[in-house]
Image: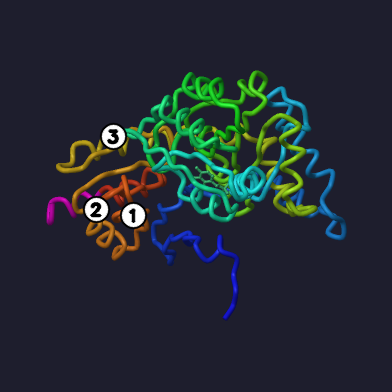
């Protein structure tokens, strides 16, 4: 009998059913690839890569650009294979047996998986009825569990709502352990909602970002964290040497240099979220949650059947089935206007026929 470590055998798998969708709206990806001008620059840059060398200055170049943008020191930036790797390693660095990690529920489904991987104790804090976070309850859970790491996600996946910045600051003021703010979708809400300016005041604060969502670079797997240099230095030990490949690094570097080229798509997706939300609100029996992201969460008594109906038509959305606090919920990533009209029409048809 093979003896796996306990954390692995107990760990739930990341359970997204994939197939060749006609319309893929289940992973909060961007609906289109790189803007043509950016793609051209990326391909030119890739042709100059030294394939024989481990990536070094490419890592520094991108880190310095991000540091410049947020008026931080380069030692305060650390890049990873998606923010997934950053989050996983932070859980590893602050976890271990006897350590508790506090996170909201429902939120990003990987938190509870990384808790297991880190052999830590997970302390989920239930969101309120409207999916807002009760900051007092959260602080209490951190204190009572003597947590080593607290995590929040804003705007939250899969509920779409923002945690007000004053609540983030309140939590930072009232807890002493490391405090990770996962801002994977922040660009859709706008920089003024970001916790980054608080980094100067709270050295236990960490902000994680990704290139996968607003910059539509999910294929390259690049994310980063911003934190006090001491946290970066300790966490870096959990990563293997040269963990990021040069192809992803130079691609992300060009994308970051040309980030204004992505603004039209970010605005379009935000507008689509509003337009689709308004269209769905009028459909009988559907609850639509306000979203500050590129996806929308719906609640509907026949969500499971609706999901099957959409699947049969090649439309992939994320169904939560009977997941606690997300019963009968579907999360749909925004596509282009034309794509959204396709699935909206199917939802309308389903409700008319079976609702
Ligand atoms: C809230 C949240 N954080 C982090 C991630 C990880 O993204 P990536 O590893 O692509 O950067 C995701 C991906 O869906 C997410 O929804």
Cα distance in 3D space between marks 3 and 2: 19 Å
Q: Main secondary structure of the magenta part?
A: helix
Front of the two marks 3 and 1: 3
Residue 106 percent coordinates (x, y): 39, 43
Q: Which numbered disc, 2 or 1, marks the residue that appears first in the sequence?
A: 2
Residue at the image point whose x is 51% and y is 24% from the top: 171
Mark 2 residue's CB less than 8 Å from ligand 1: no
Do the CB atoms of the residues marked 2 and 1 lie less than 8 Å apart?
Answer: yes
Q: Which residues are magenta?
A: 345-355
- The image's mark for residue 146 is none
Q: Name which quarter of the figure residue 99 lies in.
A: top right
Q: Name the side, left or right, on which 15 lies relative to 7.
A: left
Front of the two marks 3 and 2: 3
Do the CB atoms of the residues marked 3 and 2 lie less than 8 Å apart?
Answer: no
Q: Is residue 80 visible?
A: yes
Label count reads 3
Q: Which residue is mark 1?
A: 319
Cα distance in 3D space between marks 3 and 1: 19 Å
Q: Which residue is mark 2?
A: 303
Q: Which residue is mark 3?
A: 129
Closest to the observer: 103 or 340? 103
Residue 10 percent coordinates (x, y): 49, 62
Q: Name the side, left or right, on which 325 lies relative to 254.
A: left
Cα distance in 3D space between marks 2 and 1: 8 Å
Residue at the image point whose x is 18% and y is 41% from the top: 283
Mark 3 residue's CB less than 8 Å from ligand 1: no
Secondary structure beneath dot 3 equals: loop
């Amino acid at each position: 009998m093979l003896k796996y470590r306990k954390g692995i055998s107990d760990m739930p798998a990341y359970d997204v059913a994939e197939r060749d969708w006609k319309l893929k709206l289940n992973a909060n990806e961007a609906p289109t690839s790189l803007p043509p001008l950016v793609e051209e620059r990326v391909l030119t840059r890739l042709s100059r890569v030294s394939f024989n060398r481990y990536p070094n200055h490419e890592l520094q170049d991108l880190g310095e650009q991000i540091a410049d943008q947020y008026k931080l020191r380069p030692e305060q930036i650390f890049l990873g294979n998606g923010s997934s790797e950053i989050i996983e390693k932070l859980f590893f660095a602050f976890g271990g047996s006897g350590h508790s990690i506090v996170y909201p529920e429902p939120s990003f489904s990987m938190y509870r998986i990384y808790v297991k991987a880190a052999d830590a104790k997970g302390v989920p804090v239930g969101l309120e009825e409207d999916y807002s976070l009760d900051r007092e309850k959260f602080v209490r859970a951190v204190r009572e569990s003597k947590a080593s790491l607290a995590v929040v996600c804003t705007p939250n996946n899969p509920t779409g709502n923002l945690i007000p910045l004053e609540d983030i600051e309140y939590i930072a003021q009232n807890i002493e352990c490391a405090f990770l703010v996962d801002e994977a979708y922040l660009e859709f809400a706008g920089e003024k909602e970001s916790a980054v300016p608080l980094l100067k005041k709270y050295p236990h604060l960490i902000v994680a970002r990704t290139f996968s969502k607003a910059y539509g670079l999910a294929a390259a797997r690049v994310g980063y964290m911003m934190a006090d240099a001491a946290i970066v230095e300790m966490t870096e030990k959990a990563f293997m040497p040269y963990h990021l490949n040069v192809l992803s690094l130079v691609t992300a570097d060009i994308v970051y240099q040309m980030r204004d080229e992505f603004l039209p798509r970010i605005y379009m997706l935000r507008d689509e979220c509003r337009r689709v939300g308004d269209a769905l609100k009028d459909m009988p029996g559907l609850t639509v949650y306000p979203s500050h992201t590129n996806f929308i969460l719906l609640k509907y008594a026949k969500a499971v059947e609706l999901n099957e109906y959409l699947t049969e038509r090649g439309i992939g959305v994320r169904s939560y089935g009977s997941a606690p606090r997300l019963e009968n919920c579907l999360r749909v990533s925004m596509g282009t206007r034309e794509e959204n009209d396709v699935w909206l029409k199917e939802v309308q048809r389903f409700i008319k026929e079976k609702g």
